[in-house]
Amino acid sequence: MEDVGREMSKVLQSRELDERFDTLIQAVLNDEDVQAFILENRERLTDADIQKSYAKLYEFVQEKKKFQLKDPTMLAPGYEPQLFLNFHYIDVAYIPTKDLLLKQREAMIRSRVRAMNMPKDIREAKLVQFTQTKERSQALDAVMDFLDAYEQDPKGFYKGLYLQGSFGVGKSYLLGALANELAEKGFVSTLVHFPTFAVEMKQAIGKDTMLDKLEAIKTSPVLMLDDIGADSMSSWIRDDVLGIILQYRMQEQLPTFFSSNFDMKQLEEEHLRISQRGEDEPLKAKRIMERIRYLADEIHMVGINRRNK
């Protein structure tokens, strides 16, 4: 009797499974997208072909529901499931959505801008949002001229800009906008807050990462050194960091931009010339300035302090 009972349980369980399977398949075949696909391809699909494709049809219906509900457990988040005919077999393809493609494009563009220690508003700066005034038009025109020339021939040498002006007139913002515009056009650039970078270079000595950091900065296709002169500069940073960067870029003729509260003369006389120890080193300061002048044209930016607006 026990054997008969076991066999009867197996039979009943098997029937239950068959009934569940039939119910699931009927629900799949009733799906309007499944019906439309089968109808469209009926001449190339036999009943046996459709039966062999049940698993894929079930996958499609389940993933479509998850896609519509934006369920994060779906097989391929951001991709929409679609049916396609794979010889005599129905299969599922996952097509990236417009939102996903847009996010991927934005991520790719962001990856072309290496912004080191820059605030969010600078990292997201746009030229179209740069308020043009009479006082700032020269700087904006010069940036646009550079963009046009660089896009035409990225391997040519073009002088960058030395943007000088008081706090909040838009120097850093314009550099950030330039970096993002270059990224939109497919070009890589590096935007560095120089005082913070100088601190990191000192810290990198003990970690043995100094040369890697220096190499990444000096070899960037387009380099923007923001806030030059904001903090006192040691002789080592001036000569063995900034000097090496500028020397390499001058030799390789790589576009280089600067921003500073000092004009070029002030930077030389009041910042680069006197070391942290109070030593007067006019020749070393002049050597740095010769490289800056070779790489960039000075433009004076004036206007209201927009940081407090």
Image (spheres, rainbow, N blue to C red):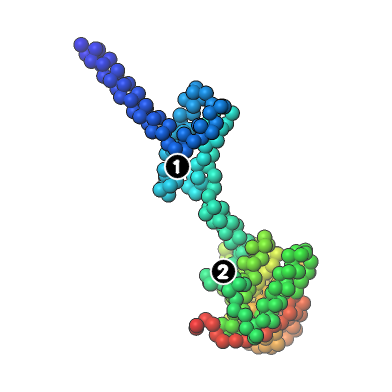
Residue 97 vs residue 110, the one in the foreground = 97
SS state under label 1: helix
**Residue 244: mark in rendering:** none
Q: Nearer the viewer, residue 184 or 194?
A: 184
Answer above or below: position of 208 versus 27.
below
Please identify the quadrant where the N terminus is shown: top left
Q: Which residue is mark 2?
A: 123
Residue type at the position of mark 2:
Arg
Q: Residue at x 66, y 65 (%)?
A: 182
Instruction: Give percent across and percent down for residue 47.
Output: 49, 23
Q: Provide residue 196's location: percent of width, then percent of height.
A: 57, 73
Q: Which residue occupies the foreground of this view, 199 or 301?
A: 301
Query: Mark 1 is on which residue type?
Result: Lys
Instruction: Please state which of the two labelled residues, at mark 1 or mark 2, is closer to the viewer.
Output: 1
Position of 213 with respect to 22 (left or right) is right
Q: Secondary structure at mark 2?
A: helix
Q: What residue appears at the point 52 percent right and 23 percent down from the top-left corner? A: 46
Residue 36 seen in the current view = yes
Q: Is residue 54 above or below residue 291?
A: above
Q: Earlier in the sequence, mark 1 or mark 2?
A: 1
Q: Are marks 1 and 2 in contact (CB under 8 Å)?
A: no
Q: Residues within 10 Å of mark 2 (few under 14, many from 20)?
A: many
Residue 239, position in %: x, y? 69, 76
